[in-house]
Structure formats: structure tokens, C-alpha cells
Image (cartoon, rainbow, N blue to C red):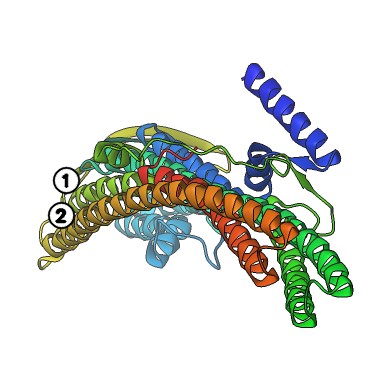
């Protein structure tokens, strides 16, 4: 990891120094564009999102611990005894005293001799008995109070999934595929950026060479105009010849102006793609190269290379796997689900030693089983829906493979065509240079008219322009072929 950071820092330092020197190579332009492209930054963050989702999915294998707490204020407290029971307990001394009094009265009636003694005992002990029993009854009623008007509860719950119908495993695989899919999409975007950079870069190089060509052509025409004017003054050429050359000079100046404007706009486009200030003057490393290096070999490829490397195909393959796992998830919702559950519950008032105003609790463990029984075909239809979506991605993958095969063949054909055009342009350039040399020599010797010299100049400019276009076209078609094969890195 440290070595990788050092290498990245070294690369950034090289890029920074090249920017300060205002000289950019193709590789530094690519690096700047990749570093500053907003879409690539977004896709990079999407990779992070997918990675975190995968990490979240892994946690579903592990037990979850939950803590809950609550407070509840009730208008009335819960009562174990009803009103009649409370009234009976609170007045049991009065009832008992009345009963004892009745018994004493009956004994006094039956035994008159004992009446004074019974009356004395009743007046002494019956009030005490009534008072004691009533007090005991009230105490008993108070003991049965729950005092649940203010209730505090707490719970600590542990849930460990045992079997969830395969949903956890499927979700883990889906997030893994989604992470890979985000990486492939990032790779696709990176290849698009590289291709845009290369096209803009070589467009600038092409216009720079055409600017040189236009300047060289204008210089030749100015020299020819100077010679024509001297020949007109000496009577060896007509004014019509001079006017023809002047027209060509004006056309060459207009062409140079157009090329300069196009070059300025192309450099601005390259700066925009690379994330550089549009007003910053830049110099490209290949500007001074008169003949661009081209690959003399014809395009050779194997379709297996494209099938193995194209990020679009890899993305569709991953999407197919994701939808296959979605079938498993849809099926898992209608399979039995087993979980291990452990709890620790605490409350105040507690109910483990009467209704005490203390926090007390207990633990419990168990197993939960959820078995779907009847859902009116919902599960079957959801599974069929997921299978249909998976089939769509398979058809899309098959269609993409066919289109990519066609794209690769078209790109290879364009590369071969560009190589042929380059070979023809080189031959035409040699002939045009030879023709221009003969025309200039003949014109100076006075055996060739000015119109023939102008035609030779025009042919030379056209041949050189075609040669420049063919060289740049080889570069661009080779890039397109690499992108079609998925080897553009």
C-alpha cells in the first residue's frame, strides 16, 4: 500500500511539473483527464458505495443485539382485587365483631347466670377484635396494590439467524457482484475518457501540422508572387498570371486563418477534457514531429480477447448473476425461517417479588420458526417475475456479444483501410513533391507557365494534407480497435 502511494505521488509530481512547463504528453493528458473527470469521480464513489453495501451484507451472518427502553404513565393502576374483595377485606373485622356479638347475645340468653360476664367480655374484647381485623384487612388490600401508574421497562435482545431460506447468502453474493459491476462501469467510463482525450490530442496534432503546411504553402505562394511580379516587370509574364497567384495567396491566407481558429478551439477542448484552464497556453510533446510513427502491421485480433476484456460484457454477465440471485431471494421469502433469540427483560415495578418498586429482570432463550402456509400464489408469481428479469439480462448479454463482434470487425476494417490510405498518401506525396520540384525548375527556366506551378503547389498541399490525415487516422482507428477489444488501458 505504501509503495502504491509513493508511485501515485511520483506520477502526480511528474504531471504537475509537465503542466507547469506547459508541455503535455499523451500519457499526461490521459492522467489529467482521469484525475479531473467528474463522471469518473462519481463512478469511483459508486464503487465505495457498493463496497460498503457488501460489508453491510456480511453482517447479516452475525448475531444482532438490540437494546430497548420505555416509560409509560397510566391513568389508573392495575388491580388484582375487585371492589367487592377490597370492601370485604377492609370490613372483615366489623363483620367478625357482629358475628361474635350475635354469639354472645345467644349465650347470654341461654345462660342468664353468665350474662354479666359475657357482656363484660364482649365490651372489652370485641372492639379490639374489630379494630385488629379491619386493620389486617386494610393492610392486605394495600399489599395487593400494583402501583402501575408509572412503569419503566427495558429489554436486551439477541437474534441469531439460523436459516432464512438462503436470503442472507444470496444478498451477500448480490452485493459482491454489485461491487464488481461498479468497478466495470468505472472501467468503461475510464476508457471513454481515454478515447476522448486521444481524439482531442491527435486532432490538435493534426491541426498543428496543417498550420505548418498552410504557413509553408503561403510562404511558397508569396515567393512565387514575388517572382511573378519581377517577370511581369521584365515582360516574361502577364498580369493575368499575377492575378491568379494573388488569388491563391488570398485563399492560402484564409485557409491559414481557419486552421489557426480551429487549432485554438481544439486546444480549448483538450484543456477542458484534461481539467486545465482554457486560457492556459499548452504545448504538446508531439507537435515537433513531422512524421507520426504508424503501425505497419494490419489489425489482427481474436474475438475471445474482446469477450474476455470488454467491461460492458463483464457488466452484463454480473447483472445476469445478480438477477439469478434475486430469484433466490424471491424464493427465500416463502421458505421456513429459523432464528435463535435471547432476551433479558427488566421492569419497574417488577413482578418477581410482588409488585416491587425496583428494577428487576430475567433472561430467556428460545427459537423462532416462521413457516408461510398460504399466500394465494404470491410467492410463485414473484419467483416467475424474477426469472423473467434474469432472462432479459441474458438476452441483453447475447445481443451485446453480437454487437461487439460487429464493432470489432468494423474497427479492424477501418484500421486496415487507414493503413492502405496511408500507403497511398505516401506515394502521392512522393509524386507531388517530385512534380512540384519539376514545376519550380521549369518555371524558373521559363518553360512552364505559372498556372502549372500553381497546380503543382495545390497538388502538393493536398497530398501532404492527406498524408497528415492518414497518419492521424491510423492513430484514431487503432484506439477505436483497442477500445472495441477492451484492451485500452
- Farthest top residue in view: 3
Label 1 vs 2, first from the N-terminus: 1
SS at mark 1 in the image? loop
Q: Looking at the image, which is closer to me, 313 or 216?
A: 216
Residue 372, label in figure: 2
SS at mark 2 in the image? loop
The reply to whether residue 167 is in sight is yes
Asked if the residues shown at circle 1 and circle 2 are in contact, with their CB atoms under 8 angstroms apart, the answer is yes
Q: How packed is label 2: few (under 14 Cα within 10 Å), some, or many (20 or more)?
A: few
Report the side of 353 relative to 111 (left or right): right
Identity of the residue drawn at 61% across and 67% down:
455
Identity of the residue drawn at 38% across and 48% down:
484
Identity of the residue drawn at 78% across and 70% down:
253
Quadrant that contains the N terminus? top right
Figure label count: 2
Judging by the rendered image, the residue that carries numbered circle 1 is: 336
Residue 18: give x, y in percent of width and height: 79, 36
Q: How packed is label 1: few (under 14 Cα within 10 Å), some, or many (20 or more)?
A: some
Amino acid at each position: 500500500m505504501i509503495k502504491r502511494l509513493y508511485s501515485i505521488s511520483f506520477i502526480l509530481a511528474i504531471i504537475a511539473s509537465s503542466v507547469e512547463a506547459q508541455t503535455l504528453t499523451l500519457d499526461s493528458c490521459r492522467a489529467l483527464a482521469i484525475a479531473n473527470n467528474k463522471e469518473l469521480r462519481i463512478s469511483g464513489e459508486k464503487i465505495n458505495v457498493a463496497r460498503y453495501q457488501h460489508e453491510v451484507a456480511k453482517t447479516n451472518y452475525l448475531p444482532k443485539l438490540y437494546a430497548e427502553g420505555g416509560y409509560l404513565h397510566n391513568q389508573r393502576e392495575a388491580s388484582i382485587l375487585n371492589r367487592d374483595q377490597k370492601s370485604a377485606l377492609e370490613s372483615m373485622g366489623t363483620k367478625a365483631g357482629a358475628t361474635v356479638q350475635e354469639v354472645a347475645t345467644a349465650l347470654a340468653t341461654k345462660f342468664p347466670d353468665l350474662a354479666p360476664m359475657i357482656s363484660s367480655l364482649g365490651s372489652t374484647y370485641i372492639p379490639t377484635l374489630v379494630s385488629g381485623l379491619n386493620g389486617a384487612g386494610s393492610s392486605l388490600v394495600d399489599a395487593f396494590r400494583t402501583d402501575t401508574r408509572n412503569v419503566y421497562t427495558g429489554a436486551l435482545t439477541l437474534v441469531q439467524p439460523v436459516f432464512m431460506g438462503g436470503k442472507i447468502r444470496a444478498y451477500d453474493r448480490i452485493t459482491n457482484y454489485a461491487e464488481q459491476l461498479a468497478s466495470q462501469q468505472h472501467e468503461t467510463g475510464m476508457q471513454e475518457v481515454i478515447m476522448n482525450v486521444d481524439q482531442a490530442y491527435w486532432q490538435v496534432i493534426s491541426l498543428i501540422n496543417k498550420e505548418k503546411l498552410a504557413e509553408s504553402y503561403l510562404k511558397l505562394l508569396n515567393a512565387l508572387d514575388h517572382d511573378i511580379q519581377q517577370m511581369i516587370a521584365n515582360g516574361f509574364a502577364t498580369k493575368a498570371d499575377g492575378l491568379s497567384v494573388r488569388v491563391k495567396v488570398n485563399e492560402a491566407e484564409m485557409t491559414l486563418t481557419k486552421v489557426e481558429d480551429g487549432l485554438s478551439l481544439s486546444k480549448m477542448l483538450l484543456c477542458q477534457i484534461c481539467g486545465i484552464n482554457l486560457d492556459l497556453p499548452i504545448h504538446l510533446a508531439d507537435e515537433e514531429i513531422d512524421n507520426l510513427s504508424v503501425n505497419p502491421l494490419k489489425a489482427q485480433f481474436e474475438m475471445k480477447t474482446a469477450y474476455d476484456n470488454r467491461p460492458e460484457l463483464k457488466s452484463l454477465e454480473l447483472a445476469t448473476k445478480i438477477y439469478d440471485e434475486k430469484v433466490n431471494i424471491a424464493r427465500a421469502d416463502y421458505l421456513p425461517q429459523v432464528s435463535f433469540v435471547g432476551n433479558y427483560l427488566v421492569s419497574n415495578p417488577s413482578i418477581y417479588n410482588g409488585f416491587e418498586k425496583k428494577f428487576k429482570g430475567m433472561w430467556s432463550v428460545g427459537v423462532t420458526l416462521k413457516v408461510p402456509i398460504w399466500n394465494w400464489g404470491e410467492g410463485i408469481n414473484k419467483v416467475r417475475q424474477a426469472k423473467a428479469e434474469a432472462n432479459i439480462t441474458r438476452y441483453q448479454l447475447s445481443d451485446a456479444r453480437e454487437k461487439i463482434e460487429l464493432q470489432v470487425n468494423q474497427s479492424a476494417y477501418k484500421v486496415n483501410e487507414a493503413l492502405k490510405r496511408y500507403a497511398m498518401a505516401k506515394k502521392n506525396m512522393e509524386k507531388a513533391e517530385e512534380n512540384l520540384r519539376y514545376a519550380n525548375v521549369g518555371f524558373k527556366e521559363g518553360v512552364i507557365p505559372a498556372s502549372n506551378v500553381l497546380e503543382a503547389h495545390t497538388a502538393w498541399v493536398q497530398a501532404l494534407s492527406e498524408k497528415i490525415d492518414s497518419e492521424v487516422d491510423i492513430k484514431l482507428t487503432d484506439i477505436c480497435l483497442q477500445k472495441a477489444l477492451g484492451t485500452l488501458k
